[in-house]
Amino acid sequence: MRDHLNTIRKDPLLLVLWLALICFAVIWIAPFAFIVFTSLKGNGEIMSTGPFALPTELRPDNYDVAWNRGGFSRSFFNSVFVSAVKVPLGIALSAIAAYALAKMPGRFNRLVFLLIVFGTMIPFQVMLAPIFTLVNKMGLVDSYAGLILPYLAFGVPFQVFILHSFFRGVPKELSEAALIDGAGHFTIFRRIFLPISLPILAALFILDFVATWNEFAMALVIMQDQSKWTLPLGLMSFQGQFSNEYGQLNAAIVITVLPAVLVYLIFQRYFVSGLAAGAVKG
């Protein structure tokens, strides 16, 4: 640790970089500190103290009141169910498709891959009206399937793009040796490619979970029944009804974002290494 500090003192550029990183960290952390502090205060204390002042009297009951008044138990279940189904299913489909396109011989592999990559360039916002029309014709409005299927359609292309690059970088001698020994492609995929791709799969899991958990626009269009709303929609409704209850409103925000933060903290050690592997290999 002392040697590291001495290195920073001797290198002015490194010192400037560290100071810049600290400033950016403070800028990013400040809104979260404001939300957490405010969620533990009463309305009177919020008005009389600064936004970043520590609460003089803790009000943890804000969370209980916000949870009950906002009916977040149902919204929380909806978000958990949609994320628990969509995220693992999307990663599994993406991994299988990426392996097939990268390692299995096929005449149209390159064309199919280019079409999938093209899917990453289409912002889903411009497709909301056609998606709603299609989902409505299929009779899936206000259903979990009606929300999960569009999520898969827009999430899988990016994951295939990353995993395809990673699988292409794996030496072909590994799969060729396994094929000579009589292993099939499914065995090769399960026993060779999945274990070595765990870091990048964990990174994609984080990105996909956060994107699915926080998604708002598509859920707003497809889920019109309030009992099927996810947490972002529940938070919108709570904000409209209790916009003057600042402590409870910020408690509701913490309830909404906390699961995504916990998932990131659990898998964060894989995040940088996984994305770097997917970007560099191939």
Image (tube, helix red, strand yellow):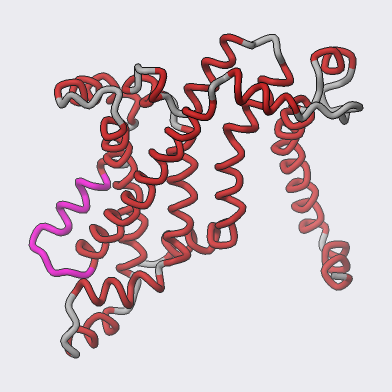
Give the residue at the far bottom of this rendering.
181
Coordinates of residue 273 in the picture (x, y in percent) = 53, 64
Q: Residue at x 42, y 24 (%)?
A: 229
Q: How many marks?
A: 0
Is 109 situated left or right of 210 in this image?
left
Q: Residue at x 77, y 39 (%)?
A: 26
Q: Nearer the viewer, residue 105 or 139?
A: 139
Is 226 situated left or right of 176 in this image?
right
Q: Residue at x 60, y 22 (%)?
A: 68
| Magenta residue check for 108 | yes
Dominant secondary structure of the residues highlighted in magenta in the image:
helix
Coordinates of residue 41 in the picture (x, y in percent) = 81, 23
Which quadrant of the view contains residue 222? top left
The N terminus lies in quadrant: bottom right
Give the residue at the far right of this rendering.
56
| Magenta residue check for 58 | no
Is 11 situated left or right of 156 in this image?
right
As displayed, is residue 174 above or below residue 275?
below
Coordinates of residue 182 in the picture (x, y in percent) = 16, 87
Q: Residue at x 25, y 76 (%)?
A: 188
Which quadrant of the view contains residue 155? top left
Magenta residues? 103-117
Which quadrant of the view contains residue 282? bottom left
As displayed, is residue 43 above or below residue 72?
above
As displayed, is residue 175 above or below residue 43?
below
